[in-house]
Amino acid sequence: MRLPRLPFAGWLWILSGLPVGLLLFLSPPPVWNAFFAFAVLLEVGHALSPIVFAWTHAGYRRLIFKYPGRYIVVPGGFLLAAFAVGAATSLGWTSFVAPTQDLTGQSYAFTDWRNPFGIMVTGYFWWNVHHFGMQNFGVLSMCRTAPRVAVPRGTWRIGTWEVRQPRPAAAACLAVTALGMVLLPKIVSREYAILFYGLIFVNHWIVAIGLPTRVEAALGGEWARARAAAFAIGVVLLGAVGFVWSAPAWMFRAYGHAVPANAPDFMLIREVIPVVLGLRYGLSFVHFLYDRHIWKMGDPEVRAIIGHAFAARTVAPGPVPSLALVPRAERRRARRVA
């Protein structure tokens, strides 16, 4: 019996997190500090990845201007709202009081329901958990060994609202991801926390950069590999903007600041400037929305753009049809099923 070949997305998902976590687990703390300096580039670079990818890819640019509400108006509204909350907080118009203790880069340092800034960060925190879980579900969906069969999903009624029932696999991915992101960091020792950091966070960041890099390489042409490498390196270098709001612990020690021994990720916020952090969370909101749309393989327009770059099982057999030949009613029906 011949085992099915694991597609690129599967290998990327398997190899991008666990080996890094094990390497960090076996390394001394100085290596951790050096790695977390680079992790700033990865974390912010991954947030920029789907945005840069969409605007630099000709196929997605057509979708952006075809659906400006989805790609421009709504993301722009989230970005402006986050900036407004941060600006109002910096101006002292809200009841926000910065914590006095050393702050880690974890968002839960600011999550509360007493002011708009805390509400915004709380929303970001749980949306981020959902975002991580859905990425895991999406990558695992690309690794199916059998052809995808669309199964209608039932709905729940809440008054006059109809809510589609979640897929069991998606719910399982979300539950496991929430366990790893929310519960385990609070109950395991620092050494094991570093293992989960690589397994969950680094994995997510590398996958978010690796998938569009794969699409760029699959476009073919003389400069395909150079174009793919330029994309990956470019978004990582753009991630240097993250040093505006975060810094690794060794920088804090160099400037005489105290660093708590139990800091879970050794990335400390330089100082609490809500307007700057508001832009940071606004970028994440835009990233969440773009990531949701550009990888929606159930959308035939998206599938026609990127389906060729991944396993054949993620797309319909045969050549990808022209979008002009796909009836509008069929596209709407496919989105409802997905």
Image (cartoon, grey):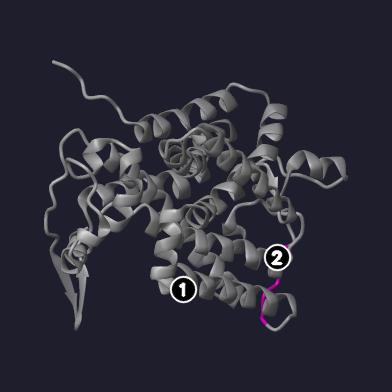
- Residue sitting at x 52%, y 53%: 56
User: Can you identify the residue that label 1 sits on?
Assistant: 74
Q: Position of residue 70 (x, y in %)?
A: 41, 70
Q: Nearer the viewer, residue 49 or 33?
A: 49
Could you tell me which residue is drawn at 19 percent across and 45 percent down?
316
Residue 39: quarter of image: top right
- Gap in angstroms between the C-alphas marked 1 and 2: 21 Å
Labels in figure, total: 2
Q: Is residue 321 toward the left or the right of residue 263 in the image? A: left
On-image quarter of the C terminus:
bottom left
Q: Which residues are magenta?
A: 94-99
Residue 249: in magenta span: no
Residue that sits furthest to the front in the current view:
222
User: At numbered mark 1, what does the secondary structure look like: helix, strand or loop?
Assistant: helix
Name the one closer to the observer, 170 or 318.
318
- Position in image of residue 198 (x %, y %): 52, 35
Give the residue drawn at x 51%, y 57%. Answer: 55
Give the mark toward the camera: 1 or 2. 1
Q: Quadrant of residue 117?
A: bottom right
Residue 114, visible in the rendered structure:
no
Q: Amino acid at mark 2?
A: Val
- Left or right placement of residue 322 versus residue 199 in this view: left
Residue type at tag 1? Val
User: Which residue lies under the disc numbered 2?
Assistant: 276
Question: How dense is the environment of label 2, judged by Cα within 10 Å: few (below 14), some, or many (20 and up)?
Answer: some
